[in-house]
Image: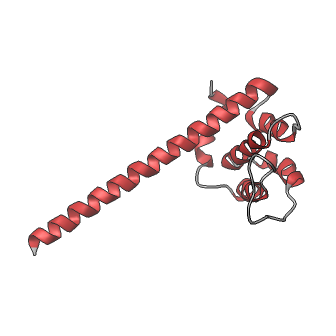
């Protein structure tokens, strides 16, 4: 019985450690994607991250995929300054299936708007985004 308890404890610690590593890795991947997307937009539009991303979103010259990535990134940043632009593209009608390369995602817009209004799990990671290079 004592051996079984040790095995269960060791297994629990192992699984918990793996879950924590996976969670931290996921945060790192999200952070890098947001950073790369911001820096790319800033390089093109020469403004801060939020303003550059909103200009990218408003550009008809950009692909829907690029614009949807800007929507997702604005949601990750959860900056209230993005709300007017995000809301201007939101119809309130979310189709059952959306192609991110053929339309602006109403689902992503809804999420981004909610996150800009209330915050999200990751927006604390971007507090020092002005120092990104």
Give the tally of numbered discs.
0
Image spot of residue 19 (x, y percent): 39, 55
* Residue at image point 24% right, 62% down: 11
Q: Nearer the viewer, residue 111 or 122?
A: 111
Q: Quadrant of residue 96?
A: bottom right
Residue 12 in the figure: left or right of residue 100: left
Image spot of residue 118 (x, y percent): 70, 59
Depicted 67 relative to depicted 93: above or below? above
Image spot of residue 75 (x, y percent): 70, 50
Depicted 1 relative to depicted 41: above or below? below
Q: Nearer the viewer, residue 53 or 78?
A: 53
* Residue at image point 75% right, 46% down: 101
Q: Which residue occupies the extreme left position in the image?
A: 2
Depicted 128 relative to depicted 107: above or below? above
* Residue at image point 70% right, 56% down: 115
Image spot of residue 89 (x, y percent): 87, 52
Q: Quadrant of the N terminus?
A: bottom left
Instruction: Give the colour scheme of this rendering.
Output: secondary structure
Q: Quadrant of residue 67?
A: top right
Depicted 8 relative to depicted 132: above or below? below
Q: Quadrant of the C terminus?
A: top right
Q: Is residue 128 visible?
A: no
Q: Is residue 33 visible?
A: yes
Residue 19 in the figure: left or right of residue 46: left
Q: Quadrant of residue 5?
A: bottom left
């Amino acid at each position: 019985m004592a051996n079984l308890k040790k095995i269960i404890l060791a297994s629990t610690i192992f699984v918990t450690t793996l879950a924590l590593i996976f969670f931290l890795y996921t945060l790192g991947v999200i952070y890098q994607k947001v950073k790369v997307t911001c820096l790319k937009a800033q390089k093109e539009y020469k403004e801060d991250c939020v303003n550059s991303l909103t200009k990218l979103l408003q550009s008809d010259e950009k692909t829907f995929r690029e614009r949807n990535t800007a929507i997702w990134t604005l949601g990750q940043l959860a900056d209230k300054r993005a709300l007017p632009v995000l809301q201007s593209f939101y119809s309130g009608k979310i189709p059952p299936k959306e192609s991110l390369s053929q339309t602006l995602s109403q689902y992503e817009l809804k999420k981004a708007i909610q996150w800009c209004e209330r915050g999200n799990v990751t927006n604390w990671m971007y507090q020092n985004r002005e120092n990104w290079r």
